[in-house]
Image (cartoon, grey):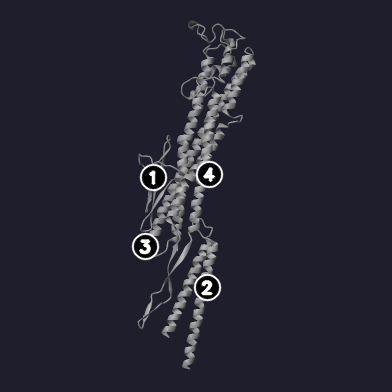
Amino acid sequence: MSGIGSLLSMARSALASQQQAVAVIGNNVANATTEGYTRQRIQLAPGIPEVRAGVVFGTGVTVSSVLRTRDGLLDQQVRSSASPSEGSTLRRDILGRLETVYGAGTDASIGNALDKFWNAWSDLANNPATPGVRTVVQQSGAALAATFNRQANQLDALEQQLRDDAGTQLAQLNTMARQVAELNVRIVGSESAGGSANDLRDQRDLLIDKIAAIVPVSVIDRPNGSDQVMIGGMPLVDGVDTRTLTLTGPRPLGVRFGSSADPTRIEGGRLGALLDAVNGDIASARAGLDALASAVVTEVNAVHARGWSVPAGATGNWDPLAGPTGSRVNFFDPAPGPSLTARGMRLSDEVAASAGAIAASDTLDAAGNNAIALRMAGLRTAAPGSASGSFGGDFDAIVNQLALDTESATTDAAVNDTLRKQAIARRAGATGVSTDDELVTLIQAQQAYVAASRLVTTVNDMAQTILDLKR
């Protein structure tokens, strides 16, 4: 009966193993759409053989382990593609928001405000003695300054939003780093005791994937089952230990580990895109607007201060000791500092108080003289202080460069997104769950289970035959 007992033992091990195989398949199917889940497969091994009368006989089958079908190289490819994809996509979106700030081609743009300003001066040149036309010049000048102010404030608001987003991304990164360290502890403890930590490893890999979207990372797998996560050659997570990242600033905005005095260079990912936008794109946009506002203020004042307003009279704003050098009234506030920036641009006190202070003539008490108004209107196409020869051209250059940058960022985002999707698809093909493949494996396990059950039936018939012989 020992032979019969061995046969039954083998059948029982086959039945139990195939039941566990079906359980693994069922778990795979159940998690086919679970984010971060890695397909598992059961690993079977033959039982310890027995030697009878010098002959070796098998003893059935055992389940040696349940393995994840994970590929470290594919993980590396997915993570290395995540940072440029997320970074370029975010930069494209930020540049799109910058284009909205400029409002090129709309009534809210600086280009449109400049056109209205020059048009008002042209009207004044045609009607230098008409008080109402001076009021239009005053209003268009105030509107131009307000447009510069508004766009500067919008840039400030956009920068603050990006700074807040950077803080949010950094907080998420630090939280996920601590979670990775906690999972390291649980994985090492589980596997050192002989258990399986497949689900915990899936959770950890998913967290590292998400970290890689925020900053570029490299991962080192430790022999004890823990992971080391590196940023810029510095460990963010090392086993059970983590290092907290903090923002530095305000300008330039940067990142450093803890209280370290040296910033950590972040190149790529959502955090890198935010830092580059604040320190590069926004700073450049603000410098461009400030330079344009300063040039407009300087050039307009240089012309206006040499002119005469109608009510100036023999003294007016003119210093008799200096000779007939103009009323010396600035159109815009010329004070150094804020007044020469887009944020602080405003009318001079004299012009803001009275449109009558606006000069059209280059001669004292010459009501019909329009020389200054003509020169002012001529700044539309010929401004000595302009980089391109006209202030409208300077603004167009800023907008055109932004359009080129946005187009380039859009192309980069499309390319990097394609590369990332390809990397994700390759990994999914190797480690993800295919319900069709699981169905095939399920049929195989079912057939093996049926065969094992037939073995039980056959052994039972054999035992019954032996019992009948003894009767």
x, y percentage for residue 325? 51, 9
Which label number is shown at residue 192? 3
x, y percentage for residue 21? 48, 68
- Mark 1 / mark 3, whichever is N-terminal: 3
- Mark 2 / mark 1, whichever is N-terminal: 1
Distance from the alpha carbon under mark 4 to that under mark 2? 48 Å
Q: Label 2, on which residue? A: 447
Q: Label 4, on which residue? A: 414
Distance from the alpha carbon under mark 3 to that under mark 4? 44 Å
Distance from the alpha carbon under mark 1 to that under mark 3? 31 Å
Q: Nearer the viewer, mark 2 or mark 1?
A: 2
Q: Is residue 37 visible in this depiction of the protein? A: no
| Helix, strand or loop for disc 4 | helix
The crowding category of the residue bearing disc 4, from other C-alpha atoms within 10 Å (few below 14, some 14 to 19, many at least 20), is some
Q: Quadrant of residue 198?
A: bottom left
Do the residues bearing badges 3 and 2 touch, measured as CB atoms within 8 Å? Answer: no
Q: Label 1, on which residue? A: 232
- Mark 3 / mark 2, whichever is N-terminal: 3
The crowding category of the residue bearing disc 1, from other C-alpha atoms within 10 Å (few below 14, some 14 to 19, many at least 20), is some
- What amino acid does circle 1 point to? Gly
Distance from the alpha carbon under mark 2 to that under mark 1? 53 Å
